[in-house]
């Protein structure tokens, strides 16, 4: 997505790192660049607002559930793979969907 206008920080960069911005996981200097971008780019600001609303909704609806330690470790491992630029093998993404529900819980 791009609004078509030139910006100091490209729309694709903002959208690629939107969750890092939302989660306060980026340096202050990058946050400042993103905030400036949102001031001048309404499509990116709209996307930011939507993702922020979804994140708040998930936290409100699911924030009290305990996450099994092994599931959290698997998810964090996949996030690390993706952030490092490595592809997650397709069978890793679909393996749990193919197992019967009783096998998924173990």
Image (cartoon, grey):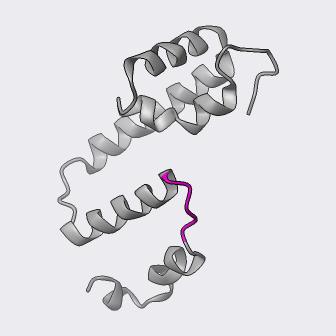
Q: Is residue 86 magenta?
A: yes
Q: Is residue 76 left or right of residue 30?
A: left
Query: As rendered, which of 95 and 88 lies closer to the eye?
Result: 88
Q: Is residue 62 left or right of residue 64?
A: right
Which residue corresponds to the image point at 41% horizontal and 56% vertical from the top-left? 80
Occupied quadrant, residue 1: top right
Which residue corresponds to the image point at 56% horizontal and 75% vertical from the top-left? 89
Q: Position of residue 72 (x, y in %)?
A: 27, 63
Secondary structure mostly taken by the magenta-highlighted segment of the chain: loop
Q: Is residue 96 left or right of residue 89?
A: left
- Number of numbered discs: 0
- Which quadrant does the C terminus fall into? bottom left
Which residue corresponds to the image point at 53% horizontal and 15% vertical from the top-left? 33
Highlighted range, magenta: 84-88
Q: Is residue 32 left or right of residue 37?
A: left
Q: In the rendered view, would you say 83 is above or below 91?
A: above
Which residue corresponds to the image point at 53% horizontal and 35% vertical from the top-left? 17
Q: Position of residue 61 (x, y in %)?
A: 29, 46
Q: In the rendered view, would you say 1 is above or below 106?
A: above
Query: As rendered, which of 85 and 104 lies closer to the eye?
Result: 85
Q: In the rendered view, would you say 83 is above or below 87?
A: above
């Amino acid at each position: 997505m791009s609004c078509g206008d030139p910006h100091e920080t490209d729309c694709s960069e903002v959208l690629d790192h939107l969750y890092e911005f939302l989660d306060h996981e980026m340096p202050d200097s990058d946050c400042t660049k993103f905030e400036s971008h949102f001031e001048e780019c309404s499509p990116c600001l709209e996307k930011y607002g939507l993702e922020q609303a979804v994140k708040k909704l998930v936290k409100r609806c699911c924030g009290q559930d305990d996450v099994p330690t092994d599931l959290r470790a698997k998810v964090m491992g996949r996030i690390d793979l993706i952030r490092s630029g490595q592809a997650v093998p397709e069978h890793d993404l679909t393996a749990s969907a193919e197992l019967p529900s009783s096998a998924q819980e173990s």
